[in-house]
Image (cartoon, rainbow, N blue to C red):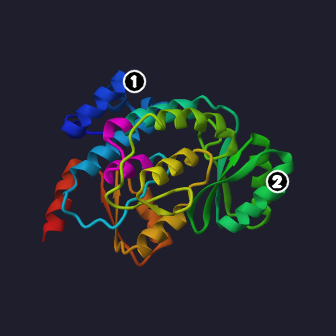
Amino acid sequence: MAGGEVLESAAGDELLRTATEEGLDLRAALDGDDASLRPTDVAQPALLFVEAVLGLSLPQDLHVVAVAGHSVGEYAACVAAGALRPADAMRVVIARGRAMAAMHEGTMSALLGLGAAAAEEVCAEASPEGIVVVANINAPEQTVISGTTAGVEAAERLALERGAKRAVRLNVSGAFHSPLMADAAEQVAAVLDAVEVSRARVPVVANVDAAAVTEPDEIRDRLRRQITAPVRWVECVRRLVDLGAGDLVEVGPGSVLSGLARRIAPEARTQQVSSPQAARTFTEVAAQ
């Protein structure tokens, strides 16, 4: 996931030291293979590491109207906005990954070809079989559901009957962004309450309601609620565009969010920054 240049950066060194203090050998995980990065308690801090380091590598004079991040990516967005110090974000995300990894009940499934409203109806009808809720609204026709195995299975059957093209079970350890994460949310809230949250320099568009927030209490509240609430990514992208973001810059490994953005807001341009070199190139483009 991370090349040597990211690992050896000043920001990266601070985050690696923080992870070590919290009992996580993040450098070894980032130097390892994909299997070493797959567990939730490692994947979340690893994602924060790469996204935060790359975000901090971007030029400071960019005109940024707002930031957003998908699920754990919201912590990197808070770092970029100056609301969380990188080391504090790492401490919270390590606690978040560990708490969520310990919640083994339930599963998740991506419903392809079914919008959020239809998915919510399916979940409501399937709820007598078990807990099942909408967890991620990723694109107009891509919705992820989460809950007990029985609830998700019942919702999958109904979704396919209602016109979903596919129901793809996700390789996750638990029912993220559902009520089954309530205990994890309490654990993370305790850690989050122990770190300083500053006023954001630019608005953070929050996962839970797509509100553009800047005040510390507003940001802390959204982060506390995020683990059990759905990621309303469609609304987040549209809010970014409504705020004036003509260019959506995806910072981190891959280009999945850029692909979703093109489906949500085709009028916006997308760019990716997935390496320090890409950050430098972006600096050159931005300066022209």
Mark 2 Cα within 10 Å, few/some/many (few <14, many 20+)?
Answer: many
Asked if the magenta segment contains residue 215, the reply would be no
Which one is in front, 233 or 60? 60
Q: Residues within 10 Å of mark 1 (few under 14, many from 20)?
A: few
Q: How many marks?
A: 2
The answer to whether residue 1 is visible is no
Question: Where does the image place residue 73, in percent across and percent down from the top left?
Answer: 43, 49
Q: CA distance from mark 1 to mark 2?
A: 41 Å
Based on the displayed image, in which of its 4 quarters is residue 60 positioned?
Answer: bottom left
Asked if one can make out residue 267 in the rendered structure from this viewpoint, the answer is: yes
Judging by the rendered image, the residue that carries numbered circle 2 is: 126
Q: Which mark is residue 22?
A: 1
In the rendered view, tell whether residue 254 sits above or below residue 270: above
Disc nearest the viewer among 1 and 2: 1
The stretch of residues the image draws in magenta is 74-88
Q: Quadrant of the C terminus?
A: bottom left
Residue at position x 82%, y 51% in the image: 127
Residue at horizontal 33%, vertical 43%? Answer: 50
234 or 201, which is in the foreground?
A: 201
Q: Give the left or right position of residue 158, taking residue 39 as reference.
A: right
The x, y position of residue 226, in whole percent, is 56, 48
Q: Residue at x 17, y 67 (%)?
A: 285
Give above or below for 100 relative to 127.
above
User: Is 82 included in the stretch rendered in magenta?
Assistant: yes
Label whose residue precedes the other's in the sequence (1 or 2): 1
- Our reading of the magenta stretch's main secondary structure is helix
Q: Is residue 119 above or below residue 199?
A: below
Instruction: List x then y, in percent, for residue 200.
Output: 35, 55
Tag 2: amino acid: Ala
Residue 190: mark: none
Q: Left or right? Give the position of 264 relative to 111.
A: left
